[in-house]
Image: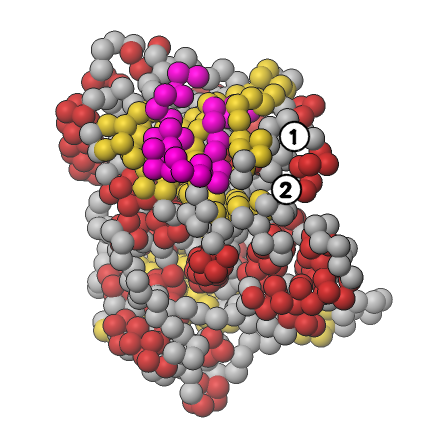
Amino acid sequence: MSEGTHASPPLLEVKDLVRHFPVRSSGVVRRTIGQVRAVDGVTFTVHEGSSLGLVGESGCGKSTTGRVITRLLDPTSGSVTFDGRDIATLSQKQMRDVRRDIQIIFQDPYTSLNPRHTVGSIVGAPLEVHDIVPRNEVLTRVQELLERVGLNPEHYNRYPSEFSGGQRQRIGIARALALNPKLIVADEPVSALDVSIQAQVINLMEELKRDLGIAFLFIAHDLAIVRHFCPEIAVMYLGKIVEIGPREWVYDQPHHPYTQALLSAVPDIKQAALGGRRGRIKLEGDVPSPINPPSGCRFRTRCWKAQDICAQEEPPLLQISPGHQAACHFAEPMDQALESAGALGTRGTITSN
Amino acid sequence: MTDVTSSPATAEASRTDATGPFLVVEDLTVKFPTADGLVHAVTDLSYTLELGRTLGIVGESGSGKSVSSMALLGLHDERRTQMSGSIRLDGTEIIGLNDARMRTIRGRVAAMIFQDALSALHPFYSVGSQIAEAYRAHHDVSSKVARNRVVEMLERVGIPQAGSRADNYPHQFSGGMRQRAMIAMSLVNDPKLLIADEPTTALDVTVQAQILDLLQDLQKEFGSAVIIITHDLGVVAEMADDVLVMYGGRAVEYGSCKELLTHPEMPYTWGLLSSVPEVGGDVDRPLVPIPGTPPSLLTPPPGCPFEPRCRFKHELPADLCRNELPLLRPGGRGPGHLKRCHLEDPERSMARVEAEVLAEVKGHEGATSDV
């Protein structure tokens, strides 16, 4: 685990990344009448062998970020530097080499594997496309990969439908591993799996991180799993990073009101079982539309601390402590936030019983 | 069948002899004949539930938690389902009830909140008209009265501008609002039993917190019985009074929420608890997954359903777990806590210690196993 200071340049450096999707009018002409600002200026780095967790609620732009980095989507602007090379503007042809080093694991193990292909051809496809293993050795390599992810190598000629959800996700992981990538973008890799199976897949990815030194960009909405897997965390809201830093800071000393509300909303088994409950900051309403995000701070419409300045000025990411940044005009530690949320009472309330 | 003597139903009965519990499920068995053979979805399930109480049913996909709850509302097609046992809801036997009688109960006495509100609501009709339809099915009132009731309910579940929002279609609602509308629809007839099947699984955590709070408030207000079906132990911990853990179509552990989560007795429950990380937990505590996959319900094993995945079967005489189904019975933690496991208490405490040691060791090896 590489926490704290990094001497070497980062493996992945994302700077001011923007991805907008045009909204077109209906009718023949289909004029562009607006932009969905899915990702709107995101900056972060991932170091070799480390992993960054990207958390946030649906629609916050975390998956779009993952897809732009893998160039499944093209960025609107901004730069993505991978291994010292800006890949944001490479052509699809130039991207080919880079794709060896950046692979993706998808959320849904049912739709991300072609049902008409055998496991062998799914896992072997990247090997053939990139022509890195002689044809007659593809099968051996496929079997090695299947064994690596805990599947029976004899099963290479079976179809995805013959496997359970957890096993299918292992197939997806084997496919991602085929080219010995340096970075894997894992987009909600376990959220479609049962809890007892989730742990199996997380442990497998942890092994890969440790044994093969693969860096992960781990995208998920499950805060507990992200905390378990990633030493560095970035919290996104409406296309922006609102808080970023080492997990000890983001989880134990969150300073952005959104992070605080998010963490306080997670049910805690131990505390609930013992009869108590932490103070909970209740947010009202839903995430606003990313077509017309609120002016200034995007969180202000749901924030109990919002004042005039929040509508006028967008808060920049400010340093709370080394490596830990939060984008809020009124950043304060959790206990004070719980107090202010309770004291103000109008938008946020503390519940404790 | 051997379970009857020590089922949750009878264990609870001692407490509630006077009037009898509101809901009694006894030896409920649901099987579906399929092309591959008979699927034993639920086997010999028994439990009771009182008004004002919340039962959490926990289990993984295929554990029978949803199938058993759909049976409470008579939602299984009789022609394609083999059902036996008994479900008594407020004194009425549900199994074998004819359609006409069932319709007077469904939505009126017992209602359900489904997981996916988008597919549970009809896209062609406005939200208000769907809720009004549910109301008028049980109340002979004018459309105007029904409309007022709809707006009242939408307001109660926290939909802003309920008057105009009632005319919106489901796609115009956000995910959280659709789930609120579903809750409004299920509560419009003041049901005494509310079944919430994974009510927050499709929602984000901040919205989930809103919906869970709403459900708790509504239960306090209406004094109804609630069954909450979920795979999320955190949700159960916050919502439930009692918890029923299901595995392979059977109840494997039952007890009060606090008791069960602090002193779980069944190795499957241990496995569930140790395979989820906690937001406030120790990051270096490794996750200990349950090896293997859930059993096929086509050919359920004759012994303990969890035996193939259990780490502790070797503690017991050879093949006992494989061949003999353990009873759901109380152990050393008192009569209210039932578990289905052959391990006796001394062996159990040894096994628990071992489970914890195993967790430590596993962390350093980081080993995983599957298949």
Give SS at disc 1. loop
Residue A181 horizontal/vertical position (percent): 40, 44
Residue A203 horizontal/vertical position (percent): 32, 39
Q: Work out whether residue B251 or residue A1 is closer to the camera in this orientation and state it.
A: B251
Q: Which amino acid type corresponds to the residue marked 1 in the rendered image?
A: Leu
Query: Residue at (55%, 71%) from the top-left corner?
Result: A288
Query: Residue at (39%, 51%) from the top-left corner?
Result: B239
Q: Is residue A119 visible?
A: no
Q: Is residue B254 magenta?
A: no
Q: Is residue B25 magenta?
A: yes
Q: Which mark is residue A321?
A: none
| Chain that bears disc 2 | B
Q: Which residues are magenta?
A: B1-30
Q: Which amino acid type corresponds to the residue marked 2 in the rendered image?
A: Ile
Q: Work out whether residue B210 or residue B240 is closer to the camera in this orientation and state it.
A: B240
Query: Residue at (40%, 38%) from the top-left corner?
Result: B18
Give SS at disc 2. helix
